[in-house]
Image: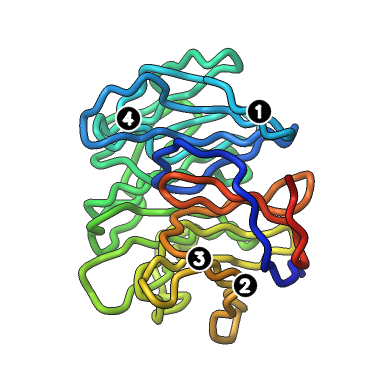
Amino acid sequence: ETGFIDVAAPFATGLHQVDNPVFDREGNLYVTYSGTRGQQVPVSIFRVRPNGTRETFSSGIVNPTSMALDPEGRLYVSSRFEGTVYRVGADGTFETFANDLGVACGLAFAPDGTLFVGDRSGTLFRVDRAGRATAFASLLPSIAAFHLAIGPDNAVYVTGPTMSSYDAVYRVALDGAVSIRYAGFGRPQGLAFDTTGTLFVVEALAGVSGLYRLPPDDAPELRLAGPGLVGVAFDPLGGLVVCSNETAYRLGVGGRARG
């Protein structure tokens, strides 16, 4: 089980992150500069090496929003402005993988290579390996984004902040049936599973914001307090990263900062 986390060290700054960052198999971290709607920015995706060196990785994607790695380790990124998912090569060049996906936000790959895409207008798409998309499930529209994660049960877990006082973490089964995993968050954002299959959720509501562990049959447990967090990713080399819009913080497990 992932231990308590209470020490954070800035790892990358000058970002505009709106969802989870992504680690590759070598421990490199990918983060975005998403920009305002339709904004052309000099760098779309940065790569941060394990030693903290930040470098330009890919440019030319408008409003890069969410990222995910497929089972072969290839990087994909959504553009909420274009409703498109791009596949990004090892050299940072990119090609269209799927389009016509609404306000394309969250991405998550199933073990068989199926890609799930969250359109914050209310549709969860399923995209096959050829890039063909079909509507898979319907959820309440979000004012901000849909954030996705694949659970150890191969279900899709989704958060999407609304104007409600409380928002849910949803579980979407393999047949598209939607149920509520937990209904008591105020403004849930990014979510991810650790190596033991435990779910962690970023809560952004002022006054209770932070990273929470969500046990299967119990209330959330605060593991890290911090304002304005939007994303979380577990490092294959140990520890994890949480992100605000502007900064990625690298953490160890059990209160050890990693720098």
| Foreground disc of the pair 4, 2 | 2
Is label 1 in a helix, a strand or a loop? Answer: loop
Is label 4 in a helix, a strand or a loop? Answer: strand
Q: Which of the 4 quarters of the picture holds residue 153?
A: bottom right
| Foreground disc of the pair 3, 4 | 3
Whole-angstrom CA distance, mark 1 to mark 2, is: 27 Å
Q: Amino acid at mark 2?
A: Arg
Is label 3 in a helix, a strand or a loop? Answer: loop
State how many labels appear: 4
Give x and y (percent) for residue 43.
Answer: 42, 22
Residue 84, label in figure:
4
Q: Amino acid at mark 1?
A: Thr
Marks 1 and 2, the one that precedes in the sequence: 1
Q: Residues within 10 Å of mark 4 (few under 14, many from 20)?
A: many
Whole-angstrom CA distance, mark 3 to mark 1, is: 24 Å
Whole-angstrom CA distance, mark 3 to mark 4, is: 32 Å
Q: Amino acid at mark 4?
A: Thr
Does residue 258 sit above or below 169 in this rendering? above
| Foreground disc of the pair 3, 2 | 3
The C terminus: image quadrant? top right
Residue at (51% x, 36% y) in the render: 31
What residue would you read off at disc 2?
A: 223
Residue 53, label in figure:
1
Q: Amino acid at mark 3?
A: Gly
Give x and y (percent) for residue 229.
Answer: 46, 58
